[in-house]
Image (cartoon, rainbow, N blue to C red):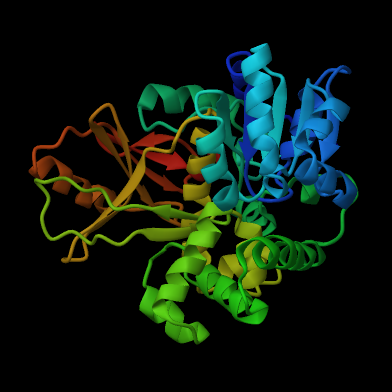
Amino acid sequence: MYITRAMEETVLAIQNSFPILLITGPRQVGKTTMLKKLSDSNRKYVTLDDPLIRELAITDPALFLQRFEPPVIIDEIQYAPELLTYIKMHVDQNGRNGDFWLTGSQIFHLMKNVSESLAGRVGILNMLGLSNSEITNRPSSPFKTQPNELIKKAKLAKPQKLGQIFERIFKGGMPALYANKTAGVEIFFSSYVQTYLQRDIRDLTQVGDDQAFFRFLSCVAARTSQIVNYADMAKDVGISPPTAKHWLSILVTSGVVFLLEPYFNNALKRLIKSPKMYFLDTGLCAYLTRWTSPEALEAGAMSGAFFETWVVGEIVKSYLNAGRRPPLYYYRDKDQREIDLIINENDTLYPIEIKKSAGPSKNAVKNFEILHKYGLKVGPGSVICLANDLLPIDENNWYVPAWLI
């Protein structure tokens, strides 16, 4: 069963504007499936996962492009960076938009080569797993806190109860888990982690100790929604802080973890300057932290962290699916005052608090006043929670049900 992806319109717009379209993102989030769905019968498909085809692409790129003449989908382009120069030559000679559709699971190896070889010729999109709006088959757009935008969304969205939301959190967003026939969640993620470790991390990044890296992966999962502390993570895993920093950068650039940077302004003082980290697939995070059911997760000590992680991930996806970089930050000062999320658009700050509660108090928005205090331009704010309906808190802020994002 194919689930329509929110990124489809953005893909078609880019392929009409650039000779090359590149979709990056973690394995198995649906990059190739979407491109195949959007392609016509004239577009060939080839994957560099095939060792024989990969060898041809590496040793004789010119012959490869004769054999697989565009329009073409080339899957897992990071395995043959030698192709990029020849793709550039072909594009410069022919100048047709949409000739090459490329996918890549390893952003950290790919982007340097792309920026050097294909600058000005490629439109790049970053794809993650299924969003809640995609799974529930409703329109997707970048999340905004403006009441008129929220009211429009509320007319199209179907309310979800606590159990339904935590079932979604526990399962995550991998399309294979929403197919008609699939293995269980635990079996799927066990296989996924082995593939990720063996094929991507060991083969492409020369991480020498698989078991230590797996422990680090689990350590990061256990700290989702927390401020990054390399020394503590290194101590827990038995590695050095520089290694922890390097390994976290691998998780970020391969689309497993999102770093939320702190908002900085010269007017603000005493700020925490370390980023917060969030797992982008809550299903993988739940597997790594050994939760065995949605009910156990919802009742457990990490339920608030998982809820916050899911909300942040959904908002990140809403921007990426529209082809936009998420303009997201958080605020925390040395007096422990925190704003979970800030959308910074057009020099206006839109504050967001995230609460795993059906009825947060009005005090949930008290820290929003910090932004006003320093004379910053502040727009409407939101408290994203488990409320049943979209309701105003005061003239500037609203309770937003989590199923509405």
Residue 168, compared with residue 322, is above or below; it is below
Q: Residue 170: x percent and y percent?
A: 66, 59
The x and y percentages for residue 210 are: 66, 77
Quadrant in the picture for residue 234: bottom left
Front residue of this view, candidates 143 and 149: 143
Q: Residue at x 55, y 52 (%)?
A: 108
Please report the residue visible at 83 percent of the width from the left and 62 percent of the height from the top: 184
Residue 388 appears in the figure: no
Can the viewer see residue 178 in this picture? yes
Q: Nearer the viewer, residue 362 or 107?
A: 107
Position of 41 with respect to 327 (left or right) is right
Does residue 389 lie above or below 153 as drawn? below
Q: Is residue 398 above or below residue 251?
A: above
Question: Which of 350 and 269 lies nearest the eye of the viewer?
Answer: 269
Position of residue 196 in the picture relative to residue 1 (left or right): left
Residue 114: percent from the left, percent from the top?
Answer: 56, 38
Q: Quadrant of the N terminus?
A: top right
Give the residue at x 47% y 49%: 312
Residue 357 placement, left or right of 130: left
Percent x, y of residue 39: 80, 22
